[in-house]
Amino acid sequence: MRKALLIFWGLLSIQFLFANEVEKIAELYKQRANKEKLDECISLCEKILATGANREVAVYLAKAYYFKAEGITDNSTRVDIFDKGVKAGELALNTIERYSKPMAEKQKEEQVLKNLTKDDMDALYWTAANLARYGKYASFTKKLAVKSRIRYFWDRIMEIDPDYNYGGVYRFFGGYYALVPSITGEQDPAKSKEMFEKGVASAPYYLETKVLYAEAYCTHSKVKNIELFRQLLNEVLTADVSAYPEILPENENAKLKAKDLLAREKELFE
C-alpha cells in the first residue's frame, strides 16, 4: 500500500512539474517579441521534447521557430529555422494516432491528412506554415521537392477550417496564386485577389494579410495597382493594434514591413 502511494504521489508530482513547465512555455511565447524570451521558449520546448513527444509543446516549438525565422534576413539561417519548425510540427502530428499509424504503414501522406479533423488543426497548420515558408526561401531544387506537399497540406486546411489563425489559409493562397511560376499554369492574379479579400474579411485586424496583399498582388506584373498598394499599407500603419494583445508582435512586425514596402514603392512599381 505504502509503495503504491509513493508511486501515485511521484507521478502526481511529475505531472504537476510538467504542467508548470508548459505554463512557463506559454508565458515565454507571449513575450516572443523579446528575442531572449523567444530563445528561452525554444530551449525549454527542446528540453522537454528530448524526454518524449508532447503535442502541445511541439506545437509551441513550431510556432516559436516560425516567429523567429520571420525576423531573420539571412536566407540560409532562415531556411534552416523554418526546417526545424517543420520537424517540430511533424513531431506534433505524430502524436495523433490517425496520422502516425497510417504513416507508419507507408500510406500516402496526402491521403492520411484526410483523417485529420478540426481538433488537429494546431499541428496541421503550424507544420504547413513552416513548410510554406521553407519552400519560399529554399533553393530551387528543394523548393520543387516540397511543392506538392505544401499544396496538399494547405488544401486540407482549407477543407477543415479556412478561418484558423486569422484566415491563414487565405493568406497562403493569396500569395500562392500571385507568386507560383506561370509555367505551372496555376498563376492567377484574380484568384490571388479573391483569397486576400477573404482573408481580410476573416480577420481585418490581423495586419499581415494586408501587407501580403499589397506585396504579392498589388506589385504583380499583370496588376501594378499602386493606389491599392498605398491604401492597404497605410491602413496597416494607422491601425490601432492595442485591442488585440494576443497578436501584438505579429501586428507590430506587419507595421515594420508596411513601412519598408512603402519606402521601396518606386523600386516595386518601376
Image (cartoon, grey):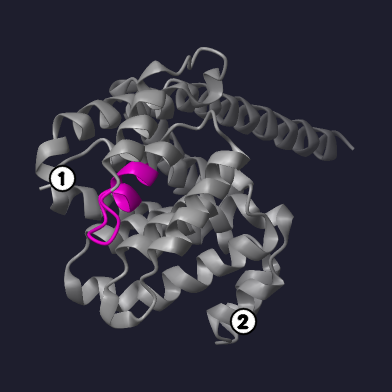
- The answer to if 84 sits in the magenta stretch is no
The amino acid type of the residue labelled 2 equals: Gln
Judge left or right: residue 257 versus residue 90.
left
State whether residue 52 appears in this view: no
Residue located 61% across and 81% down the image: 111
Question: Residue 268 — which label?
Answer: 1
Question: Residue 227 — which label?
Answer: none
Q: Residues within 10 Å of mark 2 (few under 14, many from 20)?
A: some
Residue 199 image offset from top left, x and y in percent: 54, 46
Q: Residues within 10 Å of mark 1 (few under 14, many from 20)?
A: some
Residue 64 image offset from top left, x and y in percent: 41, 38
Judge left or right: residue 68 versus residue 100.
left
The amino acid type of the residue labelled 1 equals: Leu
Q: Quadrant of the N terminus?
A: top right
List the residue tagged with mark 2: 111
Judge left or right: residue 13 versus residue 131.
right
For the magenta stretch, what is the residue range? 212-224
Q: Quadrant of residue 267?
A: top left
Residue 255 lies, with reference to residue 43, above or below; the image says above
Of 243 and 122, which appears nearest the observer? Answer: 243
Residue located 31% across and 37% down the image: 227
Marks 2 and 1: in contact by CB < 8 Å? no
Residue 270 lies, with reference to residue 95, above or below; the image says above
Residue located 33% across and 55% down the image: 133
State whether residue 14 appears in this view: yes
Tag 2 or tag 1, which sits nearer the N-term? 2
Q: CA distance from mark 1 to mark 2?
A: 40 Å
